[in-house]
Image (cartoon, rainbow, N blue to C red):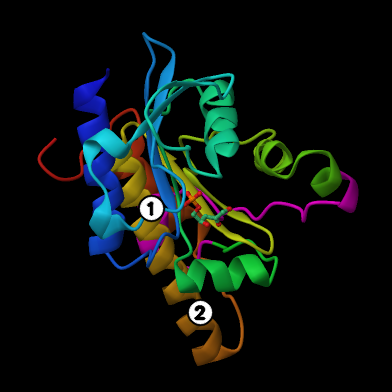
């Protein structure tokens, strides 16, 4: 079932490892077949170097396993919450990349300090509110998705395709699993650059709005021209 998507999701998971944003069994990538309403996700607790396409797990948007021998990622319910809420995304990634985790543990959004972030985000990289004891008691994985969606009320998820889970780590998404991995790697780089900026000047001087807008629009706007467009 969904062999091509399972192979694409496997490759995207292996790319996380190749890019150094996960180690051991940390992190996970999924992809969705919108027509079938099915999500392919990494199996839980399986080392990347032991993973194959037949290990991928297929779930529906109600988190029921419909294909696969293994248990799906422990973050499955967060992935499916994002697919249900953000209809234009085709891939979701979660990592424990160190600089992004550092900002998530600080419970701080990453302001847009430079053009590198502006090329990918139309503003800051948001951080969610911490989970409450009631939320953890009620449904940890489900409520994690609730807090991400709360952080995106009034925001365009395609214009800021990444978020920090307070006290935990980053999630990123995109049009495909590969696109989501790209955004997760960029998020880690932006977190690293913001950390260096803060060390260099002791502050977080925001990029000028007009420069931010120029950079974001030239890649993502209605008249985008960046690259070979
Ligand atoms: O942080 C978490 C769990 O929330 C994950 O990144 C990590 O433990 C990987 O879990 P899975 O192997 O995908 O179940």
How many residues crowd mark 1 within 10 Å: few (<14), some (14–19), many (20+)? some
Q: Where is residue 163 in the image (x, y as percent from the top left)?
A: 56, 50
Sequence-first disc among 2 and 1: 1
Please name the residue shown 38% across and 53% down the image. Answer: 46
Residue under label 2? 195
Report the side of 179 relative to 193 (left or right).
left
Is 171 above or below relative to 22? Answer: above
Q: Which mark is residue 46?
A: 1
Q: Nearer the viewer, residue 203 or 167?
A: 167
Q: Is residue 128 magenta?
A: yes
Can residue 69 be seen here? The reply is yes
- Viewer-side residue, 112 vs 212: 112
Q: What element carries label 1?
A: loop
- SS under mark 2: helix
Q: Cβ(mark 1) to ligand 1 < 8 Å?
A: yes
Q: Which residue is drawn at 70% across and 66% down?
A: 107
Q: Are marks 2 and 1 in contact (CB under 8 Å)?
A: no
- Residue 177 image-quadrant placement: top left
Point out the stretch of residues depicted in magenta: 112-134
Please provide percent x and percent y for residue 224: 27, 35
Q: Residue furthest front?
A: 69
Judge depth for marks 2 and 1 and give the one in front: 1
Give the CA distance from mark 2 to mark 1.
Answer: 31 Å
The quadrant the N terminus occupies is: top left
For the stretch drawn in magenta, the main secondary structure is loop
Query: In this view of the protein, which residue sits in the foreground, 211 or 72?
Result: 72
For residue 100: magenta? no
Q: Residue at x 54, y 29 (%)?
A: 80
Measured as percent of width and height from the top left, residue 109 is found at 63, 61
Residue for point 41% across, 42% down: 43
Q: How many numbered callouts? A: 2
């Amino acid at each position: 079932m969904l062999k091509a998507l399972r192979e694409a999701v496997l490759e995207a998971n292996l790319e996380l490892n190749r890019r150094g944003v996960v180690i051991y069994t940390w992190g996970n990538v999924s992809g969705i077949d919108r027509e079938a309403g099915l999500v392919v996700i990494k199996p839980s607790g399986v080392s990347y170097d032991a993973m194959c396409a037949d290990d991928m797990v297929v779930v529906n948007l109600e988190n029921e396993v419909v294909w696969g021998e293994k248990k799906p990622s422990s973050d499955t319910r967060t992935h499916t919450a994002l697919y249900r809420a953000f209809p234009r995304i085709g891939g979701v990634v979660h990592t424990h990349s160190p600089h992004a985790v550092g900002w998530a543990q600080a419970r701080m959004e990453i302001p847009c300090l430079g053009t590198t972030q502006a090329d990918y985000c139309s503003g800051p990289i948001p951080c969610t509110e911490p989970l409450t004891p009631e939320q953890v008691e009620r449904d940890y994985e489900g409520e994690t998705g609730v807090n991400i969606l709360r952080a995106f009320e009034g925001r365009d998820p395609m214009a800021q395709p990444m978020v920090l889970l307070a006290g935990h780590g980053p999630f990123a998404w995109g049009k495909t699993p590969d696109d989501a991995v790209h955004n997760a790697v960029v998020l880690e780089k932006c977190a690293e650059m913001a950390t260096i900026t803060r060390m260099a000047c002791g502050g977080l001087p925001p990029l000028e709005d007009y420069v931010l807008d120029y950079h974001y629009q030239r890649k993502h706007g209605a008249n985008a021209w960046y690259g070979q467009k």
